[in-house]
Amino acid sequence: MIRLEEAIVVEGKYDKIKLGQIFDAVIVTTDGFGIFNDPEKLAYLRRLAITCGIIVFTDPDGAGLVIRNHIKSAVGEGKVYHAYIPDVPGKERRKRQPGKAGLLGVEGVSDQMIIDAVLASGVRGSSRPRDPITKADLYALGLSGGSGSAALRKKLAARLALPSNLSANGLLDAVNLLCSREELARLTAEIAGTDA
């Protein structure tokens, strides 16, 4: 088991069971959209963020992104890290049909993919770049605010093994964890060059 000082926030009990087999950490469930009507749980997450930090680890579908953004805005102070899994088509074994997006959630991906995502979030010695990437950088690189920006973001997300439906703000959070400004510029140029 990998010991983490930070708490991990997941959507449901099956995610908690899966991560509990990998990490020695506090794992808190949002109970899906239940987090929107649970001020006590949000207060608990705020305390955890301030005292030890939290890792938000939701599914790569639309619901997961809504829950992630709600937690991010509700927590405010403290350390909030984001772990992302890439889009992996399929369904969890316990389900009869795939979810609306047709993608595996946290409970359905491999242990190694989960470990990689958590370690890439910036915990355990990973550090954010000293000179963070800004919204202006995304705009200058053509990743936001222009025609074709959404398509370019989608290609970059695929290259970085991130969910394909990340907004410009979500992508900004992720790239600040995963690469430097120079690496982002190089990757974006490579991806844009493949369209030419």
Image (tube, helix red, strand yellow):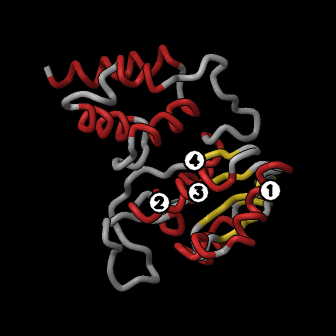
Identify residue for label 2: 66
Identify residue for label 1: 48
- What quarter of the picture does the C terminus occupy? top left
Q: Residue at x 60, y 51 (%)?
A: 72
Camera-nearest label, 1 or 4 = 1
Q: Give SS at disc 3.
A: loop
- What quarter of the picture does the N terminus occupy? bottom right
Within-10-Å neighbours for mark 3: few <14, some 14–19, many 20+: many
Along the horizontal axis of the image, is 23 left or right of 175?
Answer: right
Distance of label 1 from label 2 (alpha carbons): 20 Å
Identify residue for label 3: 57
Residue 117 image label: 4
Distance of label 1 from label 4 (alpha carbons): 20 Å
Residue 153 image label: none
Earlier-in-chain disc, 1 versus 4: 1
Do the residues bearing badges 1 and 4 touch, measured as CB atoms within 8 Å? no
